[in-house]
Image (tube, rainbow, N blue to C red):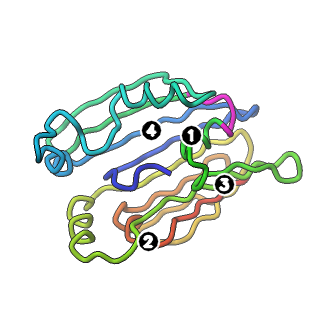
Amino acid sequence: MFLPSCIGVGADITVNSDNSGTILLEYKISRMLESIGKQDGNERWLPIPVGKADFERSLQRLPGIKLLSFSAKNDEKDIINTVKLSFDNLESLVFFLDPAGKNASHEKKDSNKNILTLNVSGMSGNNGSLNELVETISEGYSFKININLPVNGSLDAPSIPGSAVSEKGKKLHFSAPINSVLKKTEPLKLRFEW
């Protein structure tokens, strides 16, 4: 779920009573990371595909997802893309988050309970120089996910260094420094139930 090489990722998901809804995504990409992509004559292309054209192409292959808005801005430190999408149902949302079907799932429990599980991948293995680079360019960035529900729900999430969790209610929240997420050798599992 979500590209682990993105430097800052935020998702604000609103689920309606019929399981349709919206997702507001914000990607912050460090200009330092952008400069890495400008080596070898690739000046026109970011190393991470998050532009409007990328979303439009991807959404053509994803049933039940519509692009509502896209904006991009640059500041001295970051390139910031904000995307708002609508989804017809939770299956469409899951397919958008993880088209391969390995890191996101939705299931019904007792015919009226929803369980949405997201696995956020970190880095595999222990590569000292890569770890140092990731630590340098991801300092000060975070991974955040909010889910606004029509009824009270719960979030089961592991505790990792610097994380904050709102576990019960209609607004469930998880955030952590991107360093902490990337350093995990096993996926970070978030389980939302309502």
User: Disc 2 on helix, strand or loop?
Assistant: loop
**Residue that numbered label 2 is attached to:** 184
The Cα–Cα distance between marks 2 and 4, rounded to whole angstroms, is 23 Å
**Residue that numbered label 4 is attached to:** 25
Q: Which mark is residue 13?
A: 1
Earlier-in-chain disc, 2 versus 3: 2
User: Disc 1 on helix, strand or loop?
Assistant: strand
Which residue shows up at 48% across the image and 35% down it? Answer: 24
Earlier-in-chain disc, 3 versus 1: 1
Residue 168 image point, x, y percent: 67, 57
Query: Mark 2 and 4 residues: CB-CB less than 8 Å, in contact?
Result: no
The Cα–Cα distance between marks 2 and 1, rounded to whole angstroms, is 24 Å
Horizontal side of 99 relative to 138 (left or right) equals right
Residue 81 image point, x, y percent: 33, 35
Q: Is residue 87 magenta?
A: yes
The answer to whether residue 86 is above or below residue 112 is above
User: Disc 4 on helix, strand or loop?
Assistant: strand
**Residue that numbered label 3 is attached to:** 192
Marks 2, 4: nearer the viewer:
2
Earlier-in-chain disc, 2 versus 4: 4
Marks 2, 1: nearer the viewer:
2
Furthest-right residue in this view: 110
User: Disc 3 on helix, strand or loop?
Assistant: strand
The Cα–Cα distance between marks 2 and 3, rounded to whole angstroms, is 20 Å
Neighbor class of circle 4 (other Cα within 10 Å; few <14, some 14-19, many 20+) is some
Q: Amino acid at mark 3?
A: Phe
Q: Is residue 90 magenta?
A: yes
Horizontal side of 181 relative to 145 (left or right) equals left
